[in-house]
Amino acid sequence: MNALNITKGTSSKSAYNLRSGHADLDERHTLAVLVANEPGVLARVIGLFSGRGYNIESLTVAEVDHEGHTSRITIVTSGTPQIIEQIKAQLGRIIPVYDVHDLTVEGPSVERELSLFKVSGKGEKRVEALRLADVFRANVVDSTLDSFTFEVVGSPEKIDAFADLMRPLGLSEMARTGVAALSRG
Amino acid sequence: MSGAKMVVQALIDQGVDTVFGYPGGAVLPIYDEIFLQNSIKHFLVRHEQGAVHAAEAYARSTGKPGVVLVTSGPGATNAVTGLTDALMDSIPLVVLTGQVPTFMIGSDAFQEADTVGITRPCTKHNWLVKDTDALAHTLHSAFHVACSGRPGPVLVDIPKDVQFANGTYEGPAKMKSHYQPQLKGDIDAITALVAAMETAEKPIFYTGGGVINSGPIASQLLRELVEATNFPITSTLMGLGSYPGNGANWLGMLGMHGLYEANMAMHDCDLMINIGARFDDRITGRLDAFSPGSTKAHIDIDASSINKVIHVDIPILGDVAHVLEDMLKVWKARGRKTNSKALKSWWAEIDGWRKIRCLDYAADSKVIKPQYALERLEALTKDHDRYITTEVGQHQMWAAQYMTFNDPNRWMTSGGLGTMGYGVPASIGAQVAHPDSLVINVAGEASWLMNMQEMGTAMQYGLPVKQFILNNERLGMVRQWQELLHGERYSQSWSESLPDFVKLAEAFGAKGILCSDPADLDDAIMEMLAYDGPVIFDCLVEKHENCFPMIPSGKAHNEMLLGDASMKGAIDASGSVLV
């Protein structure tokens, strides 16, 4: 309980320090939200974010336990530390939410996203796209004489990097699933 | 058992004997079942919003959940304001809505609305029941969710075919829910708070509606704790009555129109103990100047209330009564210590603020001052078994300032949402719950008109509610802000074409009383009290009275305005965007 031994008026959490420059820095957090798989639960979560003005960078949802009717929603969000705490508390009070995990602070975790890229091009560009795809361990899931469709799995940063490389080589369309994440170990 | 019968059976099994509602096509099977039984009394309102506010006051004044039954479409949408009001003020409600049959959902059927979609953000939880076999369990879950943890409104949307179909009924005992909020507070945090209380030089209890929601025991424990420690105590609008207004340690309400001594004590304290309040913006004023020198503790059953706007040093998640009980235990076990020497000078400082006499006003022998009207109402009714409801505006603040609440559950007002039109139906709900008590709705004429149709309900059920209207022919609080903020340009804040309230009362079959002379006021109030039936009391008051004290928007607790003289330039540009 050392954290609670506070000299009066000097608390780093008191109102005067509420808006310190440090606290205003946005942080990116990945939240795993375990919910009852019932109608409307996703609307409740999304409505909370839009209603209270929170950010959603990505959101994925699927049932993970068919018998237990449990779905897992993975949300990547950003905000000040205070906002992140508020988001977690607000999620936690949605009735069909069983549990909220902040994977960013609860020890190491792995994040993966699946993406599909359609790259159209001919000649040298087409060869270069294929070569880079190999470097990124992308799979070719469809090909025509003037296009490839690549599947890339990895961290969001890796997918961003791949997109940056493909853009000058004829990137015409891309689709991303958003992040799925699990804690390590 | 049919779904409709299940609804009635589930209400009976939940101990419900009173329902406020309004029938319509999509709830006819349930109304048929209500016709066929005698356990539940149904009160027919005149507008669905009235049903919800009546149920809120019923809940607030009894501690039991309020129950509402309305039809689909407009019935449900009319309930939305009441639901939002109940959500903001943490009032347990179970609202049952009819819905078009399941096979017609999504077809834009007659009186179809996406009720669960519309009410999702204004309920604690809601359900659309598509299977009669799931109905009973859902209804019992609804009561569980509404009443557990931080209370709130829930809604169950029941399509008409689900009401007609047969299914298996199950009793409340079979209800399972993973929703089991934590009641006991962390004992280490409680000990840390007690340790802070032992040495605090300028402590203050800041209590809210959570104390009342936690039940009568919480108020009892709070009184014991205040008496034992001799700490000063203030409360939010929603918490009035949890500590007696005539108690020695009572500083009065705090906040935007709170008392000078309460706000100054909040600003200068060194230990703030928030019990079941939520640092609402009406309370805090300017955030970065809110009680700058204090260690802050916060007891709340809702984790999202803690650190939402004000960072606290000692958060305690739990039910107020449970935590107060442990606080008292720990404090006694550690030797009942307080810093009594420092407390003495703290009280001396507070007494200095009290000497300002912030509620003093310029008396008038010709015109009834609204403050005077409420002082007289208070004096003539304080010994009655009394419940007060209000509308929203200046009169509401004056009622909070000039009336005394010595017990919890006696004060019904719309706090968080600020719903004009709350008071008339609320007085009906409170009177239904307490048929032999005196129920007074302190109102402004503009708010009162918003749900005045409910006078019909009062007449139908012989509910002797007293409507005490402070009539200044203005939207008083709007007018005050326009004077303060908008160069005295009184845009649309005049109550034009007002009805003759005495004739209006007579048209409803009630009694009307008009009073405009301060000398007649006492007799007129006594006449109102003596009349055995609903009364509309039209009290013509000073038209331009402003409500003070006031913390202007964007200012701190120690920057209060005490009277008209201090108003000029009181709100700066950054404050004027706030409401």
Image: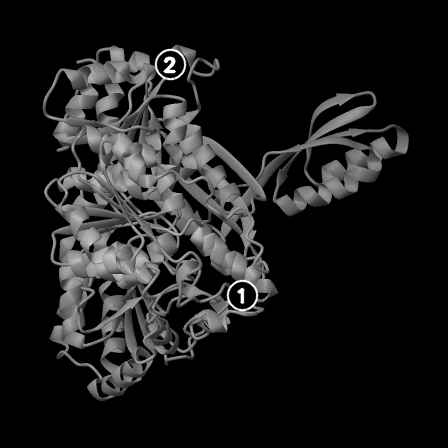
Q: In the image, A82: left or right of B416?
A: right
Quarter of the image with the N terminus of chain A is bottom left
Kind of residue at badge 2: Thr
Spatial CA span between label 1 and label 2: 50 Å
Reply above or below: A185 against A64.
below
Q: Residue at x 56, y 59 (%)?
A: B488
Asked which quadrant contains residue B103, the reply is top left
**Residue at left 39%, top 56%?**
B394
Q: Are marks 1 and 2 on the same chain?
A: no
**Please, which chain is the residue tagged with disc 1 on?**
A
SS for dot 1: loop
Which subunit holds the residue at mark 2? B
Q: Is residue B3 left or right of residue A106?
A: left
- Above or below, A153 against B415 in this view is above
Q: Is residue B174 above or below residue B434?
A: above
For disc 1, the marked residue is A23
Question: Is residue B216 or residue B185 the one in the foreground?
Answer: B216
| Residue that numbered label 2 is attached to | B102
Q: Say what amino acid the circle numbered 1 marks.
A: Ala
Number of numbered discs visible in the structure rendering: 2
Residue B485 image position (x, y, % from top left): 56, 60
Chosen colour scheme: one colour
Placement of B239 over or under A58, stated as above or below: below
The answer to whether residue A39 of the structure is visible from this angle is no
Residue B57 image offset from top left, x and y in percent: 24, 43
| Mark toward the viewer: 1 or 2 | 2
Asked which quadrant contains residue B179, the reply is top left
Residue count near mark 2 (Cα–Cα under 10 Å), binned few <14, some 14–19, many ≥20? some
x and y, in percent, of residue B319 in the image: 23, 55
Q: Image point 43% across, 18% down: which residue?
A: B112
Q: Helix, strand or loop at disc 2?
A: helix
Give the residue drawn at x 14%, y 43%. B531
